[in-house]
Image: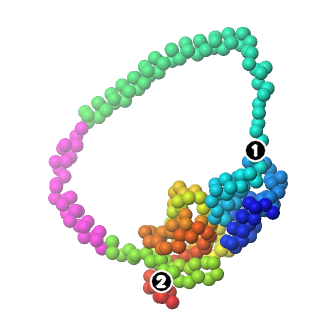
Amino acid sequence: MSDLGALLRKAREQRGYSLDDIQEYTKIRKRYLEAIETGEYKVLPGSFYVRAFVKTYAETVGLDAEEVLRLYQKELPQPPSSETVIPEPMIKPRRRSVQHNDRWGKVAVSILMWAFPILIAAVIYVYWTNNKEPDTPELNSNPPISTETTTPSLPSETTSVTPSSTPSLTPSADPVALTFVKKVGSINYYDVTSGAGRQLRLEVTGRAWIEVRENDRNGKKLFSENVTGTEPLNFDLTTPLYVNVGRTDLVTFYVDDATFDDGNAAGSTKYIFTPVEGSTAGTQGND
C-alpha cells in the first residue's frame, strides 16, 4: 500500500466510511478506489483521472485536497508531455490559395461597407416609428374629466380600515426553536417547532458532500452530491429530515433565522430534524 493510499484509508476509517459509502458519495467505481488505496494507478483510465479521483476522495473524507496533491505529487503518475513536431509541411501555402482568400476578403469588406449604412438606416427608421406612435394617444386623453368625478373621501375610508387589519396578523407567527434532544450513535436529533412554509436551509461556504433523506438514513433520497458554496439549499420541513454532511465546518444550518452551534468540526456529522408542535418541542428538549 502506498503512503497516499494509507492516508486516504485512515481518514476514511476514522469517519466510519466503507468503500461502498465513498463510491455512493463520489460516484467513483469501487475498484478505482481500491486501486488508489493500494497504489495501483495503472488500473485507472489515465493520469488525469488519477489526480481528479484522488482530489475527490480526499475532499469526501475531510482532507485538504490541494495539500494532499502537493505532498504526494511525486507518487502520482505525471501526464505525458505531448510534443508536436510535425507541422512543417503545413507552413508553405500555395499562392493560389492566398489569392483566393484575398478575393474573398475584399468581397466581405465590400459587403460590410454596404450593409453598415443599411443597418443604420433601419435602426433610424425603427427608432423614428416607435417615437412617433405615442403622439396619437394624446388626442384621446379624457382622464381629466373622470378624475373630477372621483371624490377624495373614498380613499380616506379605505386607508382608515387597512391599518386595523395588519397588526392582528403579525403576532400570530410563532418563533422558531431548534432543540437538541439526544445523540444515538453518530446521529444528532433536533426538534424544530413546526409552522406553515417552514424550511431547513443549508448555507455552504466551501466544497462539501451533502445527503438529505426523508425520515431517516433509509428514507427517500431528496439530495445527494458534492456542493460548492454558491446558493443555499432549501428543504421543506413537512416530515423529519435526515442530513449527512461530509464537512461540518463548511455548512451552517438555519430554520428561518434560527440556527445552532454544530461544533464546527472538520469531519462528517449526521442529523435528524423533526418538526413538532411548539409545546412538545420545549418538553422534549428538557428530557
- Residue at 83% x, 52% y: name it: 42
Question: Which mark's residue is nearer the viewer, 1 or 2?
Answer: 1
User: Which element type, helix, strand or loop, lies under badge 2?
Assistant: helix
Q: Residue 146 in the image: state x and y as whole percent.
A: 20, 46
Relative to 212, is 128 above or below? above
Amino acid type of the residue tagged 2 in the rendering: Ala
User: In this image, 41 relative to 59: left or right?
Assistant: right
**Range of magenta residues:** 141-169
Q: Residue furthest bottom?
A: 287
User: In this image, 264 relative to 151: left or right?
Assistant: right
Residue 33 can be seen, yes or no: no
Tag on residue 247? none
- Residue at 47% x, 83% y: name it: 281
What residue sits right under mark 2 in the picture? 281
User: Which element type, helix, strand or loop, lies under badge 1?
Assistant: loop
Q: Does the magenta stretch include residue 251?
A: no
